[in-house]
Amino acid sequence: MSNQEVQRRVQDLERRIIDAKSLVVDSRLRLKDYLKGIQKIIDRPDIDDAKDPDKDLFLISVLEVYKMFLLKEKALYTTLNKFKIEGGLYIGFCWIPTLDNQEVMRHVEGLKDKNRNIEIP
């Protein structure tokens, strides 16, 4: 290899390194913009009073809403996975506060009236 060829390859490699660094910087900026976009704060239009000291309590982070939704879904499916499936029904035990017992039984009775295949012990 001649000296000129080596210098040309070195220059080509230096150019490629500069391009790669530029790509990394651009990718980081785009990633930051993307993360800012999904973390955007939604201002509630129904709360107009800028003088209200509690106004910041009504700002909603979309990412936090998704996080809460996923935690709720995970808890639901974790609980459902503990039930036994028999004949297409989920069977399991649950705890109901005494104060809510009547309301839950009304809902179960309503389900029974809508679907005659449901049996209540």
Image (cartoon, rainbow, N blue to C red):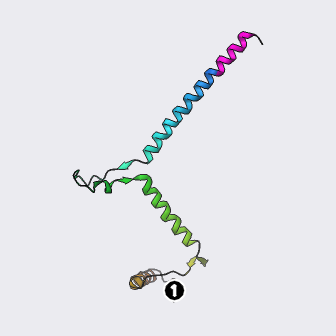
Check residue 84 for magenta coloring. Answer: no
Residue 121 percent across, percent down from the top left: 51, 89
In this image, 14 relative to 41: left or right? right
Q: Is residue 106 above or below residue 34?
A: below
Q: Residue at x 55, y 28 (%)?
A: 22
Report x, y in % for residue 39.
Answer: 43, 48
* Span highlighted in magenta in the image: 1-13
Residue type at numbered disc 1: Glu
Residue at position x 62%, y 25% in the image: 17
Characterize the magenta stretch by its predominant secondary structure.
Answer: helix
The structure residue drawn at horizontal position 44% and vertical position 52%, both measured from the top left corner, is: 63
Is 105 above or below relative to 88? below
Q: Quadrant of the N terminus?
A: top right
**How many discs mark residues in the rendered view?**
1
The residue carrying pointer 1 sits among few (fewer than 14), some (14 to 19) or many (20 or more) residues within 10 Å by Cα, namely few
Residue pushed farthest bottom?
A: 121
Which secondary structure, mark 1?
A: loop
Residue 105: which quarter of the image?
bottom left
**Residue 64 in the image: x percent, y percent?**
43, 55
Q: Nearer the viewer, residue 6 or 81?
A: 6
Residue behind mark 1:
119
Q: Nearer the viewer, residue 40 or 76?
A: 40
Residue 58 in the image: x percent, y percent? Answer: 31, 56
Q: Residue at x 37, y 49 (%)?
A: 41
